Each structure stands twice: as structure tokens, then as C-alpha cells.
Amino acid sequence: MDFETIEPALCTLVASATGVESSCVLFENAPRVRHNGQLALLSWVSTGNVGGATDEERWAYVSNADPLQEMRVTLTGPRELRLQVSVETLDQRPGYTARVLAERARARFAAPSARAALEAVGLAFVRATEVTRADYRVDGRVVPRSLFEVQMNGAASFEDTDARTSYIATVGVTATVKRPDGSTVSPSSLQPTTGDA
């Protein structure tokens, strides 16, 4: 998963789903903007392996000038991601409240166009939780806020560059076979012939 691609795509999707101006949709650790009365903050609640499974090792031969670096291992596995979407708005007219914008976004995440946008960055929509009220007080006034979570699936893959190793191109075996009396068996006598039973 490439979060440098995923996070801007999620901001674009949330802006479209809520109607909040795109410059006012950002991840919570990004520098805050002076918003126009509406703000949508995104934050990762959790990311992890699906069902506690470990990633699978996949070894592959890649030609390299250094023969000790030709076998490379990639670890891949499914991921479950939970994203919290928090919507704030100072507008309390019917149809413009934080709850309405959040509910609209929650429903739109399940739409085919939203699923396609997620698929374009390697994610799959699973479900969206109910909208929860989370108002807070600042400077003596209440800021209306509603939030919900989106559960998605993805896949992670990375190469363990420290685990590169050599490639064994050919294997030769040298052995001596002895008869019970101690004499050496010649290699040609060990080869089967068509007449042997």
C-alpha cells in the first residue's frame, strides 16, 4: 500500500462525498487551514493484518552483477484499514449540519463511483459505521461535529532488501559407493539398463 497515493485520494473522495471544499479536507496531522465554516478531518484508527495472519514470503530470482544478491524475498499480505471521518460545520440550517454531511458521506462510500475510486488506489470498501455525535467546546462555544468510520481492505507488499541471498545455479554430487566386500562400484554400473528388472 502506498499511503502517499492513498491519503490524497481519500481526501478527494471525502470532499466529494460531504460537499466540503477540498482545501478543508485533510488528515489530522496535516497543518490546519483556516476553514470557511466546514472542516473534514481524516485519521487512521487502525491498520493491520487481516485476522492476525502473518505475511507470506515469496522468493524470486533477479539477475544481479553480485551473485550474492540474486535471490530476493518479498513479503505480502492482506490488510484491514479503519479510517475515521470527522465533519464539523458552523452552519446549523436544515440540510447543512455536521450530522447531515457525515451521513451523506457515510452512505456515498458504498456507491459504485466511490468503490471505483478506492479500487484505483488498491483498496476495497467493506462497510461504514453509524454516524456519532462528537461536539466539543472551544473558546466558550460549542463546535458541532459528527464522525463515522470506514472499514477497507487492501494488500501490503515490501521487499526485505537485507535478506537478499545467493542463487544456486547448479549442484554437483560426488560419492563413492562400496560393495559389501569393500570394493568400489563403478559409476557406469550404477546406471540402469533397459534389460534390468
Image (tube, rainbow, N blue to C red):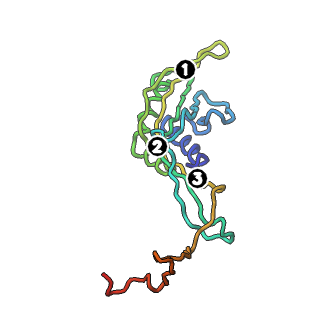
Question: Residue drawn 66% across and 36% down?
Answer: 30
Label 3 close to label 2 by CB (< 8 Å) = no
Of labels 2 and 1, earlier in sequence is 1
Residue under circle 2? 153
Along the line of sight, the residue nearer the viewer: 8 or 143: 8
Q: Amino acid at mark 2?
A: Asn
Regarding mark 2 in the picture, which secondary structure is present there? Answer: strand
Q: Earlier in the sequence, mark 3 or mark 2?
A: 2
User: Badge 1: how crowded within 10 Å, few (<14), some, or many (20+)?
Assistant: some
Residue 139 located left or right of residue 20: right
Quarter assignment of residue 39: top right
Instruction: Give the Cα separation between the discs numbered 3 and 2.
Output: 17 Å
Q: Which residue is mark 3?
A: 158
Q: Amino acid at mark 1?
A: Pro
Amino acid type for the residue under numbered disc 3: Phe
Occupied quadrant, residue 7: top right
